[in-house]
Amino acid sequence: MPIWKIYFLIVVLSLQSACSVLLPVRSWPPELPSQEYFIDYYQQNEDNHTFQALEDYLYWVQIFYQGNALSPGWFQLTRELLQETDVDRQAFYAEKMQTLGLLISAEWAQNNNIRLIDTRCASVWRDALLEALAQNDLDNYMQRFESDVSAILSGELLKGDIELARYYDVEGFEFF
């Protein structure tokens, strides 16, 4: 193959990959938080790059917020919470859920080999939130929830420590 063809091929492949970096990854729904926040988070966690491409990471962020057939997502959980709270407290809880959503989703969307917050943690927190609503204990629970998310992200708490019994004494199902 002549050298000019090899050079041309290298230039074309280089330009193609450069264009893919500049283009937005998949269509980003306007109701989601800023895509740039998640791109920055992804870029800061270089260990994850070995296991997951940016496009895959952003896809999982969208799933976290919007849900899928198996899970209703963060937006639905927030709507459920706000429907059950007094009107005068809704803005307060909406802000808390927005902040927690950013922290949790950015970490949760990473590859299983890397992330500090997994689906089990998210499920426990959802169940505990529903229990807090049932017990009229939302303020207390939200403080513990925020504290535990911060502790996991700072390395002071392990994801394995997140269990429903940490928040509420709820009896499990009994099978016959």
Image: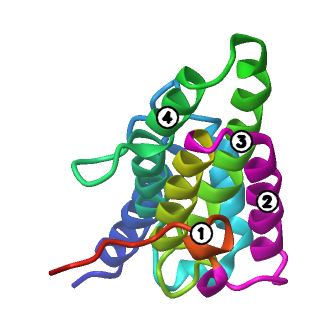
Q: Nearer the viewer, residue 36 or 123?
A: 123
Q: Quadrant of residue 172?
A: bottom left
Q: Residues within 10 Å of mark 3 (few under 14, many from 20)?
A: some
Q: Amino acid at mark 2?
A: Arg
Residue at 35%, 81% in the rendered image: 3
Span of residues in magenta: 134-161
Residue at 41%, 62% in the rendered image: 56
In this figure, which residue is indicated by the disc labeled 3? 138
Residue at 40%, 39% in the rendered image: 66
Residue 143 higher or lower than 51, as above or below:
above
In this figure, which residue is indicated by the disc labeled 2? 144
- Cα separation between marks 4 and 3: 18 Å
Q: Nearer the viewer, mark 2 or mark 3?
A: 3
Image spot of residue 144 (x, y percent): 79, 59
- Cα separation between marks 4 and 1: 27 Å
Q: Coloring scheme of the render?
A: rainbow
